[in-house]
Amino acid sequence: MNAKQKLTFVMMFLVGSAYADNEIYIDQVGDSSVIEIVQDGSGNKVGGSTSDDTKFLLDGDSMDFNVNVSGGTNNLIGSIIGTSTVDIDVSGSSNDLFFDVDKDNAYGATNGDFVIDLTGGNNELDLDVGSLDTANDLDFDMIVDGDFNTADINIDASSLTFNMDMAGDNNNLLYNASGYDGHEFVLTGIGSYWDIEVNQESTLQTDSLEIEYDGSGTSSTDATICITQSDSGESTGCQ
């Protein structure tokens, strides 16, 4: 498929309690693809397992990937290779989102635009973007609204802007940013008993960080924030 062609997928699955769980596997190669997936119900999957070849795979530049999931215990598992616009909207509880964007540096993930919105509790996000400083000029916006959510985000980018809003109790965030040019991270949140770790490391460039959080912990349940920033110097990290 050449750069002038455009392939569009629209997939809608409405799953009620009387029907079997739904599973989608996608292996798409080509530029300028538009893929939209809508799932309503519980126990659904986009991709199969993190341990085998049933993960979804999208390979190409200028892709537009949109996912809207409503319900609980749904999974999004797979890989995206190339420059993409990614919009993921998840509403429900106990959903797992495990995916990476050009993790092995096949083409680079330059000028990516990601929006992720998680509403509900006990959701888990594991996201890896780029390697070897390839996710250049990434714009990333994320909203987490609910309790007991966990996000593990690793981005290897030259020039990164990441804005995140969190609301809810007992939420955990581990964010690692590396790469040559500077990174900008803005976190705004409200809620109690959070555990936040931010590590930003660029190479002799300026990293900026702004955190505004309203909440508290107790003697038995902490509310902790640990920040490490380094321009290739020595750092002790979070203990």
Image (cartoon, rainbow, N blue to C red):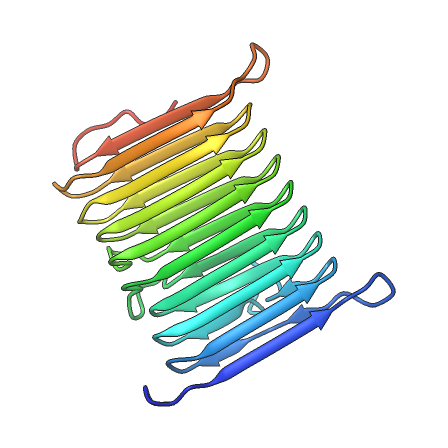
Give the answer, above or below, for where 194 lies relative to 174: above
For this orientation, the residue located farthest to the left is: 204
Quadrant for the N terminus in the image: bottom left
Q: Residue at x 27, y 50 (%)?
A: 160
- For this view, does 31 lie left or right of residue 41? left
Q: Residue at x 47, y 77 (%)?
A: 34
For this orientation, the residue located farthest to the top is: 219
Give the answer, above or below, for where 46 lies relative to 218: below
- For this view, does 17 lie left or right of residue 183? right
For this orientation, the residue located farthest to the right is: 18
- Residue 120: x and y in percent read 64, 44
| Quarter occupied by residue 115 | bottom left
Q: Residue at x 63, y 68 (%)?
A: 38
Give the answer, above or below, for where 113 lies relative to 27: above
- Residue 196: x and y in percent read 44, 30
- Residue 231: x and y in percent read 17, 37
- For this view, does 73 lie left or right of residue 235? right
Q: Nearer the viewer, residue 221 or 137?
A: 137
- Residue 186: x and y in percent read 34, 38
Q: Tag count in the figure?
A: 0
Quadrant for the C terminus in the image: top left
Q: Residue at x 38, y 68 (%)?
A: 84
- For this view, does 107 lie left or right of residue 120? left
